[in-house]
Amino acid sequence: MSAASLELSGRIEGATHIFPVRVYYEDTDSGGLVYHANYLKYAERGRTEMLRLLDVNHTETAKRYGLAFAVRDCAIDYRRAARLDDVLEVRSQLFDLRGATIGVDQGIWRDSDLVAHLRLRIVCLNRQGRPARLPDPIRTTMQPYAKTREQI
C-alpha cells in the first residue's frame, strides 16, 4: 500500500484507531446539522480504515477466506450535534474477540467533545450468510489491539 493511501486510513495510537472526517454539505440536513444516519457512515469508514491499517482488507478477506463482516447489532448514543465544516475524529477500539464476533467501541469526537458513541458487534459470515469463525491469521493480527470489555 502506498504512503499516500496509508495517510487516508488515519492512524493507530496505542490500541485506538483515529480517523479524521470533515462534515460536508451533503452530510447535513436543512438546518446545517449532520443527519443522524451519517454518524453510522462515519463509523463504518473508521472501522474499514482501521482494518486496512491492520492489513485486513475486505476484498482480500472475501477472496482468500470466502468471508465478509456485517454489523450484528449497534447501539448509538447521540451526545452533541455536528455541523457543516466541523472536523471530527472517529476513534475505534476492538474488544471481545470471540469465535465469529468482534466487539467495536467507537466515539465520534469534535475536539474534546464526544459527539456520538457507538457500541457494535460485528459478525464474520461465510458465503451462505452463516456465522463463521474468524480465521486465525486475522484473529492474530487483531489480538494485540483488542481490549477486554472492562478496559473500554
Image: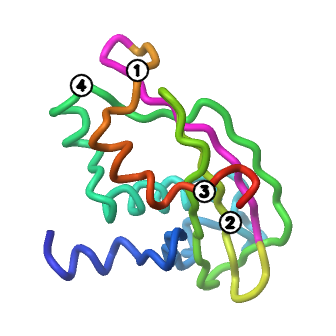
Q: Residues within 10 Å of mark 1 (few under 14, many from 20)?
A: some
Q: Earlier in the sequence, mark 2 or mark 3?
A: 2
The residue depicted at 49 percent of the width and 73 percent of the height is 19
Q: Residues within 10 Å of mark 4 (few under 14, many from 20)?
A: some
| Secondary structure at numbered mark 4 | loop
Label 4 sits on what residue type? Gly
Please tell me whether mark 1 or mark 3 is closer to you in this view: 3
Please tell me whether mark 4 or mark 1 is closer to you in this view: 1
Q: Which residue is mark 3?
A: 147
Left or right, residue 76 beside residue 134:
right
Q: Is residue 58 magenta?
A: no
* Residue extent of the magenta highlight: 115-128
Label 2 sits on what residue type? Gly
Q: Earlier in the sequence, mark 3 or mark 4?
A: 4
- Quarter of the image for residue 73 reads top right
Q: Nearer the viewer, residue 63 or 116?
A: 63
Please tell me whether mark 3 or mark 4 is closer to you in this view: 3
